[in-house]
Image (spheres, rainbow, N blue to C red):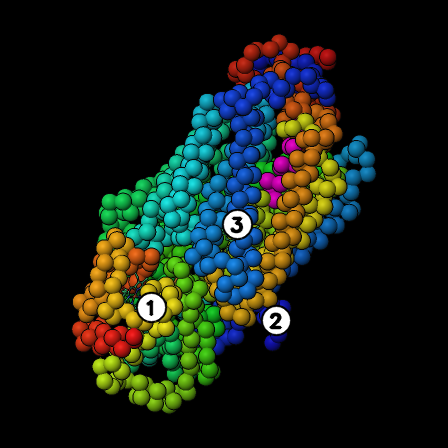
């Protein structure tokens, strides 16, 4: 059914979470629109009808009218109570995850979305989900506040560093949906985007299996994959350009000037410290914005990353 | 003639005072020179100094807004870097809120008209009033120090833990500035409350208080009660930043959601500090230009107070997605609807006031009409945002940006412009060009809607706020919005030109150019240093347009040199001059 304000809302790809929201959005917007038109017509009509004729115009003394006053308090009150109830039930639904939901863990950090699946598969800035099955995201931030928002599903929740939060949805069409970060988190907040990739159920199983093994190959190959998977490339280029952080090109072995003016040679230990605790030594000319990877990457993974960085001459 | 009611009334000797249209001695000629202005305790001059400061910050923040809109012409970089954009929107928001809207109506226009509407010579504590102004200036200086210290890019909300990052020198300076500014706000509020209680001229009962005074009264209560909480919040934030005491930052064992509670406990009421005084102006202007008694005096007066009190209980509606408790979320949503009702009541009462009036579409009235239209949209979209499930979708998108611009700019700023044009002749003794005034109002209306209507649509479609970059599908909305902002810019330049030109060669203003029944119009334009050269005596309410003008031009026949006790007035013995 076409509705007056349909053009305002994006696609609805998760009816179980979106339908109630959309219904209420249309209800409020339509009622408001009617009232606004009413008020506007009254304003214009009065302005024309009672236009001042002369400076000596006399006006009647009308001080108040209790019936009017009560009706335009009580009627809006009743309408808003309906809106409250409707909004509340829709919201309860958004907070009540179906029992059979498939769980995926989300870790947000400047300026990436990491997703961990039940079989150990990991993705960065791509959330793979099966169609027609409820999905629950358990989310945590590794630095500041972020907020997970998928307009097409009508779900949003802040992602906090000190507690888990969750959202759920059930996508009904294979395809893609946009993920935004909606809590301001610094320089590249507006680039903290990701995609939901909605698979047919069997296709999803295949995808999980092929990606379940994590990184593989020689240490350098593994390091290369890790640098992508861990979001390093959001801030470090491989070709010498300066983005948020220094480029990885030619990094190993070079003399680095730190913010306090001292210099260090980039060796294994320095890189290890830079990954685990980047605030300890901050490179001159850069802000201390790198999220610590303490607890996020294992010793072996760090070694592999280092081996890979050595190859970037 | 009113008949005296019995019961121990003091009988006053009352005389008619018709204000001169050609005053020789006014507050502008009384003391001259920079020093006299800087040390003045005259509420009118202090009001003007606030007006100047507010206009300065508005111009600055408005200019930044144009820069922001220009940057948003294309996705990614148009002409400034992401970090610069982030600093600019923070500065724009913080200045508009703390330096422009909070002090604008109460401290600038309110300072000027409040004592006059009460028939007083000044506010209760004139020196404190001057002190408030300097505290305001002092607080503003801190912001500029902050800009010199790396600036700040946290958004005007200073959410932790982002704001407690290592680079927090800029944040510390600006939050201290806001902290200091708070005192200015508290002092003005205290001053106004005292003045309203103690300095009303004989005959101004609570039932004859102009609605502008009721609005300022409600505002002052919020200022006095809410601002200290902001101060505490900022102190805690600074303690965390400077001394590493964990309060809000999880890395130190604090809780970021706690910060949000603290912040909005002030900042939601602050929204009412910004809008309620606007309501007062609307009531004054709409009655004057429709020559009609206000409809629902008590409904409007008391709804301001209701808003002031319920407004304290809804802060959590900014935190529906934050991870606050479910019970809190439910209660806050419910209360949010309750606070919407008194606001709706006001709008309907204003519209009803026009019924059978004698409507003169002068510039101030045009701004009132613009206000009624825009603010109604702001209010309705507030209801949309108060609905839990819908807010989950709309929170932190451009829908919210559009909503608060409709409320703050479409509401408060339109009211301010209405009031500025309404009282300009009183403040300066000069008339501005009416045609230019009307053109600017129409241009603002067009520019405003072009700028902000598209933002509702892109917001509902998912465009998040505080975004430097955006995905291509939103380009058309952003570009329309940017064009609208240029129209707005032009409109403001016209207003500036019109008002400045009136100072140089504007027509001389008579004492009461709009034939208002308001007491402030019974002083000369511009007023005498002590506002009235007699103690005014009031026997009718400020909206009694059915009573003849002579009965509004009364004063004590024998000056009591001060305003003394509040007598009930009998006019049986009125001597007509
Ligand atoms: C009374 C007038 C105004 C007030 C009180 C006001 C207030 C605000 C506030 C509080 C913010 C939020 C800043 C933040 O999120 O930290 C903001 C953002 C913004 N305002 Fe205004 N504003 C006003 C006028 C304008 C005008 C005239 C324009 C356009 C020409 C404008 C354009 C913007 C833009 C582009 C943003 C940034 C939105 C974003 O990136 O999220 N504002 N304003
Ligand atoms: Cu973000
Ligand atoms: Cu609020």
B356 sits to left or right of A197: right
Residue drawn where x is 50% and y is 69% of the image: B471
Where disc 2 sits, the SS reads: loop
Residue B282 visible, this angle: no
Q: For the point 72% across and 31% down, which residue is it?
A: B506
- Residue receiving disc 1: A247
> Which region of the structure is painted magenta?
B414-426
Q: Which residue is tagged 2? A: A3
Q: Secondary structure at mark 1?
A: loop
Q: Position of residue A287 (x, y in %)?
A: 33, 57
Q: Are marks 2 and 3 in contact (CB under 8 Å)?
A: no
Q: Are marks 1 and 2 on the same chain?
A: yes
Q: Is residue B333 left or right of residue A34?
A: left
Q: For this rendering, which residue is in front, B79 or B163?
A: B79
* Overall secondary structure of the magenta section: helix
* Cα–Cα gap, marks 2 and 3: 38 Å
Residue at image coords 25%, 81%: A220
Residue at x 52%, y 35% (from the top left corner): B53
Circle 3 — which element? helix
Residue bearing the label numbered 3: B64
Same subunit, labels 2 and 3: the answer reads: no
Q: Is residue B139 left or right of residue A307?
A: right
Q: Chain of mark 3?
A: B
Image height check: is B577 above or below B488? Answer: above
């Amino acid at each position: 059914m076409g509705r007056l304000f349909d053009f305002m809302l994006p696609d609805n790809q998760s009816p179980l979470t979106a339908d109630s929201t959309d219904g209420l959005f249309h209800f409020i917007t339509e009622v408001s629109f009617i009232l606004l038109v009413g008020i506007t017509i009254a304003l214009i009509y009065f302005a024309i009808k009672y236009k001042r004729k002369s400076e000596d115009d006399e006006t009647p003394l009308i001080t108040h009218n209790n019936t009017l006053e009560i009706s335009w308090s009580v009627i809006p009150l009743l309408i808003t109570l309906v809106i409250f109830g409707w909004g509340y039930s829709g919201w309860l639904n958004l907070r009540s995850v179906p029992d059979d939901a498939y769980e995926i863990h989300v870790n947000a950090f400047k300026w990436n979305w990491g997703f961990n699946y039940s079989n150990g598969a990991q993705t960065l800035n791509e959330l793979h989900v099966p169609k027609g099955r409820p999905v629950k995201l358990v989310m945590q931030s590794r630095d500041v506040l972020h907020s997970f928002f998928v307009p097409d599903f009508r779900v949003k929740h802040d992602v906090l560093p000190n507690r888990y939060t969750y959202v759920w949805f059930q996508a009904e069409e294979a395809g893609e949906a946009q993920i935004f970060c909606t809590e301001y988190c610094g320089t590249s907040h507006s680039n903290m985007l990701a995609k939901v990739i909605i698979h047919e159920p069997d296709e999803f199983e295949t995808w999980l299996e092929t990606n379940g093994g994590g990184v593989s190959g020689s240490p350098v190959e593994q390091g290369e994959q890790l640098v992508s998977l861990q979001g390093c490339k959001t801030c470090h280029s491989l070709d010498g350009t300066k983005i948020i952080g220094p480029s990885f090109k030619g990094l190993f072995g070079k003399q680095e000037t730190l913010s306090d003016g001292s210099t260090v040679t980039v060796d294994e230990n320095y890189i290890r410290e830079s990954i685990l605790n980047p605030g300890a030594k901050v490179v001159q000319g850069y802000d201390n914005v790198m999220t610590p990877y303490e607890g996020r990457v294992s010793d072996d993974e760090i070694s592999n990353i280092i081996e890979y960085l050595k190859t970037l001459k | 003639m009113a008949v005296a009611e019995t019961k121990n009334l003091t009988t006053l000797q009352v005389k008619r005072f018709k204000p001169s249209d050609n005053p020789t001695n006014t507050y502008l000629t009384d003391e001259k020179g920079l020093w006299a202005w800087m040390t003045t305790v005259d509420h009118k001059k202090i009001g003007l100094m606030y007006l100047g400061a507010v206009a300065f910050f508005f111009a600055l923040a408005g200019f930044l807004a144009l820069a922001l809109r220009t940057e948003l012409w294309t996705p990614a970089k148009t002409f400034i870097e992401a970090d610069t954009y982030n600093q600019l929107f923070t500065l724009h928001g913080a200045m508009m809120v703390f330096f422009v809207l909070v002090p604008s109506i109460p401290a600038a226009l309110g300072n000027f008209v409040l004592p006059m509407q009460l028939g007083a010579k000044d506010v209760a504590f004139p020196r404190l009033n001057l002190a408030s102004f300097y505290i305001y200036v002092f607080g503003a200086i801190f912001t500029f120090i902050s800009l010199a210290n790396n600036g700040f890019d946290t958004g005007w909300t200073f959410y932790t833990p982002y704001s407690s990052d290592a680079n927090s020198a800029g944040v510390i300076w600006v939050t201290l500035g806001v902290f200091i500014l708070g005192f200015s706000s508290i002092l003005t509020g205290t001053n106004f409350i005292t003045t309203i209680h103690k300095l009303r001229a004989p005959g101004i009962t609570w039932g004859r208080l102009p609605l502008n005074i009721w609005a300022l009264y409600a505002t002052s209560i919020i200022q006095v009660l809410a601002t200290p909480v902001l101060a505490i919040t900022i102190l805690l934030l600074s303690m965390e930043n400077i001394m590493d005491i964990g309060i809000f930052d999880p890395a130190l064992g604090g809780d970021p959601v706690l910060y949000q509670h603290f912040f909005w406990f002030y900042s939601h009421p602050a929204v009412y500090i910004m809008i309620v005084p606007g309501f007062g102006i609307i009531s004054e202007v709409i009655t004057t230009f429709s020559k009609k008694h206000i409809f629902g005096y008590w409904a409007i007066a008391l709804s301001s107070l209701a808003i002031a009190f319920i407004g304290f209980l809804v802060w959590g509606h900014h935190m529906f997605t934050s991870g606050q408790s479910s019970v809190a979320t439910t209660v806050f949503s419910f209360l949010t609807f309750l606070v919407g009702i008194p606001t709706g009541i006001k709008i309907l009462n204003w519209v009803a006031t026009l019924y059978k009036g004698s409507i003169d579409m002068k510039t101030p009235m045009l701004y009132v009409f613009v206000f009624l239209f825009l603010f109604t949209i702001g209010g309705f979209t507030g209801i949309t945002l108060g609905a839990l499930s819908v807010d989950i979708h709309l929170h932190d998108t451009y829908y919210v940006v559009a909503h608060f611009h409709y409320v703050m700019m479409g509401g408060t700023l339109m009211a301010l412009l209405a009031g500025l044009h309404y009282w300009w002749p009183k403040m300066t003794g000069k008339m501005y060009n009416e045609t230019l005034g009307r053109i600017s109002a129409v241009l603002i209306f067009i520019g405003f809607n072009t700028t902000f209507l598209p933002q509702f649509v892109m917001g509902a479609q998912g465009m998040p706020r505080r975004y430097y970059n955006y995905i291509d599908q939103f380009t058309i909305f952003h570009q329309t919005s940017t064009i609208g902002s240029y129209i707005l810019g032009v409109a403001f330049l016209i207003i500036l030109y019109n008002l400045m030109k009136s100072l140089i060669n504007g027509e001389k203003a008579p004492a009461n150019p709009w034939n208002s029944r308001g007491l402030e119009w019974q002083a000369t334009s511009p007023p005498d240093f002590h506002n009235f050269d007699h103690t005014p005596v009031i026997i009718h309410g400020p909206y009694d347009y059915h009573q003849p003008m002579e009965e509004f031009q009364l004063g004590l026949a024998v000056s009591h040199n001060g305003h003394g006790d509040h007598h009930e007035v009998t006019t049986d013995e009125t001597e007509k001059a």
